[in-house]
Image (cartoon, helix red, strand yellow):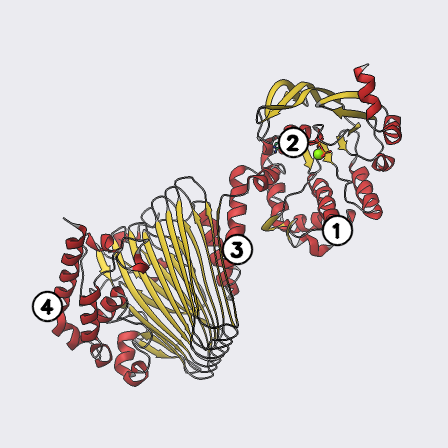
Amino acid sequence: MEPVSEKITLDNQLADWYFSNRDLLMSSSSSVFNSVRPAAMESFRKLGIPDASFENYKSTNIPKIFLSPLNRYIEEKKILFSVDDLFHCDIPELDTELVLIVNGWFYENRPRLQVLPGGMIVGSMAEAARQYPDLIKAHYSKYADYEKDGLVALNTAFAQDGTFIYVPRGAGSDRAVQIVNVLLSPEDLFVQHRNLVIVEEGATARVVVCDHSLSARQFLTNSVTEIYLGPNAHLDYVKLQNENDNCNQISTSFVHQERASDAIFNTITLHGGMIRNNVYTCLNGEGASNQTLGLSLVDETQHIDSYTFVDHAAPNCTSNQNFKYILDDKATAAFTGRILVQPNAQKTLAYQTNNNILMTSDARVSTKPQLEIYADDVKCSHGATVGQLDPMAIFYLQSRGISVREARLLLMYAFGHEILGKISVEPLRERLSDLVDKRLRGELSRCNSCPLHCQETC
Amino acid sequence: MLSIRNLKATINGREILKGINLEVKEGEVHAIMGPNGSGKSTLASVLAGRDLFTVTGGEVLFQGSPLLGLTPEVRARAGIFLGFQYPVEIPGVSMTSFMRTAINEQRKYRGLPEMSATDFLKLMRDKKALMEIDSALASRSVNEGFSGGEKKKNEIFQMAMLEPKLAILDETDSGLDIDALKTVATGVNRLRRPDNAMIVITHYQRLLDYIVPDFVHVLSGGRIVKSGDKSLAYELEEKGYDWIKEENEA
Ligand SMILES: Nc1ncnc2c1ncn2[C@@H]1O[C@H](COP(=O)(O)OP(=O)(O)OP(=O)(O)O)[C@@H](O)[C@H]1O
Ligand SMILES: [Mg+2]
């Protein structure tokens, strides 16, 4: 089959799936989702699954990962398992508010929606849309633009559940919210979830997201997360991707920041198949600051593709994009970092770096900065490096009795440390540093080789 | 302890060491002097196991066993230490984790258990004091942003931590101010024992006032062209290297 007609067939199949399930979708969801669905579907039919003809998707063959036959469900298929078992599987166990999402659906090991001391609300997105339609409506689909990206359109057309976090004005606790996205199924599965994080004026939130697979099946996740930060709000968001190598993932996040808010959005990728991460940031109010960071350790035939877009829409904002990749074996990676400085965004500071270490001559990385600057009083910089570990440094370490293996580990760990060091929750930083160290040592379970055989529970 | 016999080495096909002979016994300090580019650092690197150089002839015995087939880390664990002429900066690796890894790798090799955190920190503290090393320096990344003199002191600090049998110090005195030179020399002298040995590469007789050598060798054009006692260093200081070259040509 021709690639073009393959894509048309794929797009049609997904559209058909929508139309044949539209009634079920509509009747089972809140009007907040339903009111946007038709327009999102219309947009999807125009855009389809992005192939290489889309400028932003040249580095990753997205249609290909949609082509393998995966099961898709509009209704939740209940899966039971022991929550305690989770933490044997290299998911950091932290003192957090734990929200469990299984195959995109809220898992009822806690109330579907909970108001915590201080007024924070945490739980299921579907439930939140039912209970707080006005609150959701003010933000839902306001930042995630389904008219530009077919994957966002697809997610919006089918949106049903995911995680909801709301931190009201001035509130916030030191306790982090941990979202564990679990993939667990006896069959290959396509999963979409839709998440919303609202941090109102002066509020503080810490969110840790752990993506994890517990079955050795093939999964494809297409998730969309919208994040709103009101004036002076603070957010520390860390996403840990640790799925087995049969799991492909497209994760698209939109971070909307108002005046003097500040956000760290940090993605740590340890395992996975083909991963595409999109992070769109809009600095919409004066004096906002944002750090979009990433550390990816990929090997074998893994592929990681990060796309970041920082839109400086207001003056005096600061942004820093810093992505680091370590590639082994035949792994491939891409980084595209776009910075847009709008005409009124004077005194913008915008930085971008992408540093890569290739452990083999078969590993490949491509890096592409895109700067569009329409204001004159700005400071922007970008830089990228691709290199090997410094042989002189390895010899120096060896000359003190350290083996080559240990020397390489020290250097790789040091390389990643800059990103890990930005994690503000100390126990989390330590746990993640440990996981990265284990990953570098090849001791981190790939789940399908996990000694606990969690998959037998389903 | 160390016997070097007719050692030859090349880099990119160019012969740098053209037949070195040197015998170092326990308790001895040997100084190697010689013009720039004569091969002093090359000799040190070859002894430490840098694979940039190809050994094309000769042999080296360390404590009776052949050395040249061993990897750099195995040589280090066997007790060879190289104080680098140009210590390497390693951003992101703290001095502490560097030294802890080195010590534990060496202990593992000797069949000893890992050093406990408290013992390790105490050792660090003692050796820092010995070398008059600023505490802040030890909490930074290896050599990163260290001044020239700080880097050299840091080499001797590492030597103090690892207590090698044979230390090869390549121009450890270059770039040191007078006080630092004394500190380094004192540190080195305290590490001298009847059962270990040192090869000190230097351009300046001044260092040898502090670290008094048993032998002084002149390396020139890839060969040891003259050996003597410490008075040779004074003679070199006074006359330069030309008279040796002339003497050899005659
Ligand atoms: N990495 C290298 N690549 C090419 N040539 C090299 C390399 N390292 C050393 N050499 C050459 O080998 C020769 C000996 O160098 P070496 O560094 O051993 O001299 P040295 O006696 O230590 O000099 P100095 O007193 O200046 O430190 C020089 O001609 C030098 O250019
Ligand atoms: Mg030299």
Residue A174 at x, y = what percent?
49, 73
Amino acid type of the residue tagged 1 in the rendering: Ile
Q: How would you rate the neighbour count of disc 4 (Cα within 10 Å): few for under 14, some for 14-19, many for 20 or more?
A: few
Whether B96 is drawn above or below A287: the answer is above
Label 2 vs label 3, nearer the camera: 2
Residue A393 at x, y = what percent?
58, 42
Residue wearing tag 3: A417
Residue wearing tag 4: A20
Residue B233 found in image quarter: top right
Residue B210 at x, y = what percent?
86, 37
Q: Where residue B133 is drawn, which disc sits there?
A: 1
State the separation of the CA atoms marked 3 and 4: 49 Å
Q: Identify the residue at image location x=72%, y=35%.
A: B170
Q: Where residue B45 is drawn, which disc sits there?
A: 2
State the separation of the CA atoms marked 2 and 4: 73 Å
Are dots 3 and 4 in contact, CB under 8 Å?
A: no
Q: Nearer the viewer, residue A388 or A216?
A: A388
Amino acid type of the residue tagged 4 in the rendering: Ser
The numbered mark 1 sits on a residue in which chain?
Answer: B
Amino acid type of the residue tagged 3 in the rendering: His
State the separation of the CA atoms marked 2 and 3: 31 Å
Whether A447 is drawn above or below A209: the answer is above
Asked whether the residues under marks 4 and 1 belong to the same chain, the reply is no
State the separation of the CA atoms marked 4 and 1: 74 Å
A427 on left or right of B78 = left
